[in-house]
Image (tube, rainbow, N blue to C red):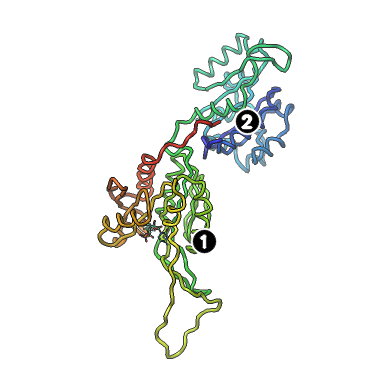
Amino acid sequence: MKQTLQNKRLLLGITGGIAAYKSPEIVRRLRDAGAEVRVVMTRGAMEFITPLTLQAVSSNRVHSDLLDADAEAAMGHIELARWADAIVVAPVTADALARFAQGRADDLLSTLLRASDAPVLLAPAMNQAMWRDAATQENSQILSQRGYRSIGPADGVQACGDVGAGRMSEPLAIVAAVSDLFEKQTLTGHHVVITAGPTRERIDPVRYLSNFSTGKMGFALAEAAAEAGAKVTLIAGPVNLSTPDRVERIDVISADQMLAVVQQFAATASIFIAAAAVADFRPSAPTDQKIKKTSGIETMQLDLVKNPDILKSVAESEQSLFCVGFAAETENLLAHARAKLARKGLNMIVVNDVSRSDIGFAADDNEVVVITPKDAIKLEKANKRHLARRLIQLIAEQVSPADNSDSG
Ligand code: PMT
């Protein structure tokens, strides 16, 4: 199952029909496709299936009551309406269709439909005669004219024994229709692993070696990659930044720890972006006790050993991974960066001038040249978040689209 709904937040509404027994399977399939799912049930739905079942399969509390003070305190109905990237109602009964068409707002589900701007997909399910009924058809048309999409109902034998159009579409078909609500984004189906920030190499319990990286560049890239539809794993050294929305973050301290976590995720990822400023060396023998000053001795020798080159080792071991490095340079930017591109076996390197105080380390802005074996593209000075979006677009143009053919 490909992650076609990666990062998507879906609200599944369930109304009171026998097809509600298939709703847990819809939740499961939506989650398999990468979505986060919250469930809203009408009173009728709860006669057919329990909220506990839906809570178990969605891993989220089920919402059912517009006037539930506890639920409103946790996530109010307007917040829930804004949270959703799309609303799916499956099954939709004839009565629910009528209520939605009338624009009612007297229960939680109908209120959410009023309060949300998200696209809506309806999966009607009812007796074949009720589906053919003129009022039902009219209601269905009204909703379609308002921009609601629908799937089904399908033909076949019904729970009541009748044969005809009225069965709810199968869960996999509903998931495919949900995917179609979203335009394909440039990194849909990709898993991007990003390193950010500095590493700290321990000297003794109170001292370490590190550098001036704040993580701003790497975090901006993680945010931009998630916006472009990718699954994002951000491996961060010690920084003081909050995690971008929809990004999985793993904190590390040293280069050795960063290498171990990168290796764990790189094996299944499709893109690796190394924006971290990894310390090139670490103390060869960090001490357990604080190193004391000795009177009369004015100098101190620190013996260092080379740290592993995370980027080079991953680029060597994961041949199918699209590897993007950063080059922090102070002179001969292009020549040094091209040499790193070749030496580390990369697909792309992004060079920045870290001798300038207005860009590079710690600054809000950056200015870079993006170098591939064929090209060199300058990205003018801009805020790191803006620049990150341009970088992600350039990367997306270079990688092949993820194969989503067996999605749903
Ligand atoms: O974090 P900010 O304050 O926003 O600053 C951003 C930045 C200046 C840190 C960023 O734009 C940047 O340049 N990151 C790379 C810093 C660096 O370590 O460059 P380098 O030229 O020394 O290393 C080349 C590449 O190899 C980098 O992708 C680096 O992550 C990687 N590397 C280096 C050493 C090592 N042991 N392992 C590595 O993976």
Q: Is residue 288 left or right of residue 64?
A: left
Q: Is residue 360 left or right of residue 30?
A: left
- Please tell me in which quarter of the rendered image ligand 1 is found: bottom left
Q: Residues within 10 Å of mark 1 (few under 14, many from 20)?
A: some
Q: Quadrant of the N terminus?
A: top right
x, y percent for residue 324: 39, 50
Count of numbered circles in the view: 2
Q: Is mark 2 within 8 Å of ligand 1?
A: no
Which residue sits furthest left? 332
Q: Residues within 10 Å of mark 2 (few under 14, many from 20)?
A: many
Give the mark nearer the N terminus: 2 vs 1.
2
Provide the residue designation for mark 2.
26
Q: Is residue 95 above or below residue 5?
A: above
The image quarter in which residue 335 lies: bottom left
Q: Secondary structure at mark 2?
A: helix
x, y percent for residue 311: 42, 56
Provide the residue designation for mark 1.
257
Q: Is residue 89 above or below residue 82?
A: above
Q: What residue sits 53% from the left and 77% below the top?
A: 287
Which residue sits furthest bottom? 296
Q: Secondary structure at mark 1?
A: helix
Q: Amino acid at mark 2?
A: Ile
Q: Nearer the viewer, residue 404 or 159?
A: 404
x, y percent for residue 47: 74, 27
